[in-house]
Image: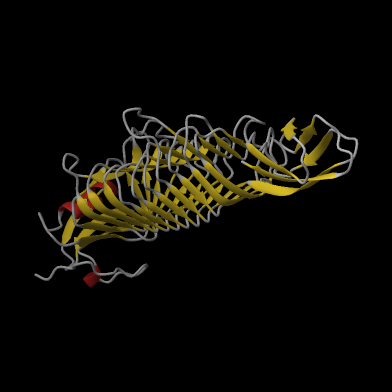
């Protein structure tokens, strides 16, 4: 018997040679048939999908496909997927039944995990109004490796839409919509590309994984808390992503488990971190907050704050429990409550553009007969270091340093104008 190995399924019209078992609905009934047309199941949608999965070759080492044709499917129990299983459901709508309160899809071997599972297409509805206590996530994979989820919509779940703690999850072009929370990601070595997270109540992404990449993902329109929370996560990369419109922090780095390393070696390059909508509380939350973390790098990002009211307390906040971290060539623009930044990290490096300049320099003139001159440094933040070089043999120092200016002071008024070169740095 010829088996299908990794054959690409046409997005909308799969022929009998492109699947091993097909599930479909007709005249209110649900059926499962193999690719030769042999009837496997006439039963509920849940039973037909599970029996279709179970009818695939046992203990196989190649991928076999279950195709779910277009239609509405009420799922009343968790569907268990084995290794080397591909579930194709473009144009199918799977909705969790009333009062089920279980995951809709998981992997069968939760002791050692499963490998090479693919979910391609379909809408998966958690029906949160009738399922208020799903224990983990609507799609919940435990351990395992080489899991792929692509072109799905996972929505309306009263918990996480997706949870995974194994190795190598690949997620492409998925939409995580209107859930209590979006994705809970542990494990390591994951790749996310062009996914969309919107209107998830608590958080779009809770990240505790390592060595993962997020390329062109959109995180936004978060209803109550944070867009993304990084907990004890290391070596992750975010490139070309958007983190938009959180009610609290857009990005929050923190520690959840003190026995694990703090967030470190996470890289943010060329992202847009933006706040257009009003935050939940005025002058209470920052846009980016690093409570704990070392050796994280933010390079060439745009951080923009333009809500009409309830503006963020700080655009960027780094606590004294964090550092060293590196902020290189980031541009900060827009509105803030208390100050553009609050930077207390240990040995961190800062180089900003826009509202904040990491360094500035100029020449001040201490006029004849004066002992003090005020200099506007235009950095937008109180500098940590000021260097003064007078053009005459005169003793000078600085006082009254603020976010906008400082004073150059001498104890003896000069008899002619003295030009003093100054340089201010964070």
Examine the image and state in which quarter residue 386 appears. top right
Q: Residue visible at 47% across and 47% down?
A: 297
Quadrant where the C terminus lies? top right
Toward the viewer: 418 or 216? 418
- 289 is higher (above) or lower (below) than 198: above
Count of numbered tags: 0
Residue at the extreme top: 258
Residue 275 position within the rendered picture, expressed as x and y whole percent measured from the top left? 62, 45
Is 309 situated left or right of 88 in this image? right
- 357 is higher (above) or lower (below) than 369: below
Residue at the extreme front: 393
Is 356 situated left or right of 119 in this image? right
Is 363 situated left or right of 81 in this image? right
Q: Residue visible at 57% across and 40% down?
A: 246
Quadrant where the N terminus lies? bottom left
Residue 230 position within the rendered picture, expressed as x and y whole percent measured from the top left? 43, 39
């Amino acid at each position: 018997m010829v088996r299908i190995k990794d054959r690409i399924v046409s997005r909308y019209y799969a022929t009998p040679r492109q699947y091993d078992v097909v599930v479909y609905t007709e005249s209110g009934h649900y059926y499962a048939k193999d690719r030769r047309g042999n009837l496997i199941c006439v039963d509920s949608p849940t039973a037909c999908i599970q029996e279709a999965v179970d009818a695939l070759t046992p203990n196989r080492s190649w991928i076999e496909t279950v195709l779910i044709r277009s239609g509405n499917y009420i799922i009343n129990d968790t569907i268990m997927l084995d290794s080397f299983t591909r579930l194709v459901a473009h144009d199918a709508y799977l909705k969790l039944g009333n009062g089920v309160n279980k995951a809709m899809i998981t992997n069968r071997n939760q002791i050692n995990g499963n490998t090479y599972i693919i979910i391609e297409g379909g809408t998966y509805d958690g029906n949160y109004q009738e399922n208020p206590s799903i224990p983990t996530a609507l799609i919940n994979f435990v351990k395992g490796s080489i899991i792929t989820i692509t072109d799905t919509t996972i929505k309306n779940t009263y918990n996480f839409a997706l949870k995974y703690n194994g190795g190598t999850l690949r997620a492409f072009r998925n939409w995580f919509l209107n859930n209590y929370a979006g994705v809970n990601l542990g494990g390591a070595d994951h790749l996310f590309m062009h996914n969309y997270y919107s209107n998830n109540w608590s958080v779009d992404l809770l990240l505790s994984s390592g060595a993962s990449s997020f390329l062109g993902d959109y995180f936004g329109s978060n209803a109550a808390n944070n867009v993304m929370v990084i907990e004890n996560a290391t070596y992750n990369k975010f490139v070309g992503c958007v983190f938009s419109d959180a009610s609290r922090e857009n990005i929050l780095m923190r520690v959840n488990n003190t026995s694990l390393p703090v967030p470190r070696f996470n890289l943010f390059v060329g992202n847009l971190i933006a706040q257009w909508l009003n935050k939940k509380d005025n002058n209470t939350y920052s846009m980016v907050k690093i409570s704990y973390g070392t050796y994280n790098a933010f390079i060439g990002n745009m951080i923009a704050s333009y809500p009409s009211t309830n503006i963020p307390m700080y655009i960027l906040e780094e606590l004294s429990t964090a550092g060293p971290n590196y902020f290189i060539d980031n541009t900060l623009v827009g509105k803030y409550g208390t100050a553009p930044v609050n930077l207390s990290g240990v040995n961190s490096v800062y180089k900003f553009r826009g509202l904040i300049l990491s360094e500035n320099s100029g020449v001040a003139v201490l006029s004849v007969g004066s002992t003090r001159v005020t200099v506007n440094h235009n950095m937008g933040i109180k500098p940590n270091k000021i260097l003064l070089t007078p053009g005459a043999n005169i003793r000078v120092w600085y006082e009254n340093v603020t976010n906008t200016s400082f004073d150059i002071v001498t104890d003896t008024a000069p008899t002619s104008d003295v030009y003093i070169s100054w340089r201010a740095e964070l």
